[in-house]
Image (spheres, rainbow, N blue to C red):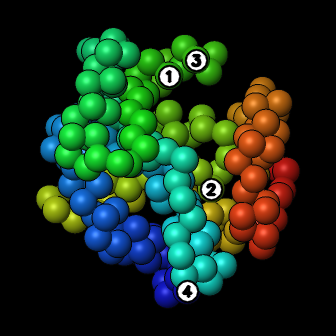
Amino acid sequence: MLRFRTAAGVRDLVAGVPWRRRALEAVVALDLPDCCIGAGFVRAPVWDALHGYTEPTPLDDIDVVYYDPACLDPGAEAQAEARLRDLMPGLPWSVRNQARMHLRNGDRPYRSTAEAIRHWLETPTAVAVRLGDGRPGLLAPLGLDDLLDLVLRPMPYAQAHRTAAFRKRLETKSWLKIWPQLRLKWR
């Protein structure tokens, strides 16, 4: 069970698992600017803990996000993924430069990783963790309430402009089946 329903508790839960800590260290080794691991890497262990699961829910991918407007080449992302596969083989790495993701989403250019995370589709996914000076830090531009309260809701932006994409993720991710205590809410 999640002992502390706080940012520190979430950080400890994620970074306290040895393989997750090693994954964070591998990402630090890439030396990418404004870099962290987000989405299910944080969300899934929190929801698992709140559901009392003793076995971790498998991850479809490990979302490494960074912000580098000086290098928008997708090839750089592929190189980073290859390096992570060398450092920690067998994990489903996905690396994306948030400085170019606005193009895919039809948004204005983002100015940071935190701003890009604010445009992800659902509120409990908009959280990430990174190591700084060897200690974990949490990036949660919208806070942790929905994540910790088991609320699944679209971001305000997604509800207004990307409802179909949100509904598709609900269908394909099966979150409501995997974590049955989740409550789907609309603003």
Report the Cα–Cα distance between label 2 and label 3: 21 Å
x, y percent for residue 170: 77, 46
Q: Do the residues under discs 3 and 1 have CB atoms within 8 angstroms?
A: yes
Q: Report the amino acid beneath label 4.
A: Met
**Mark nearer the N terminus (2 vs 3):** 3
Report the Cα–Cα distance between label 4 and label 1: 35 Å
The disc placed on residue 124 is 2
* Quarter where residue 51 is shown: bottom right
Report the Cα–Cα distance between label 3 and label 4: 37 Å
Q: Pointer 4: what residue?
A: 1
The kind of secondary structure element at disc 2 is helix
Of residue 175 and residue 186, the one placed in the foreground of this image is 175
Q: Report the amino acid beneath label 2.
A: Pro
Q: Report the amino acid beneath label 3.
A: Arg
Depicted 2 relative to depicted 140: above or below: below
Task: Sort mark 2 into few (<14), some (14-19) or many (20+) by Cα contacts within 10 Å.
Answer: many
Q: Residue sitting at 78 percent across and 73 percent down?
A: 181
Q: Residue sitting at 26 percent across and 49 percent down?
A: 88
Of residue 62 and residue 133, the one placed in the foreground of this image is 62
The disc placed on residue 101 is 1
The disc placed on residue 104 is 3
Report the Cα–Cα distance between label 1 and label 2: 19 Å
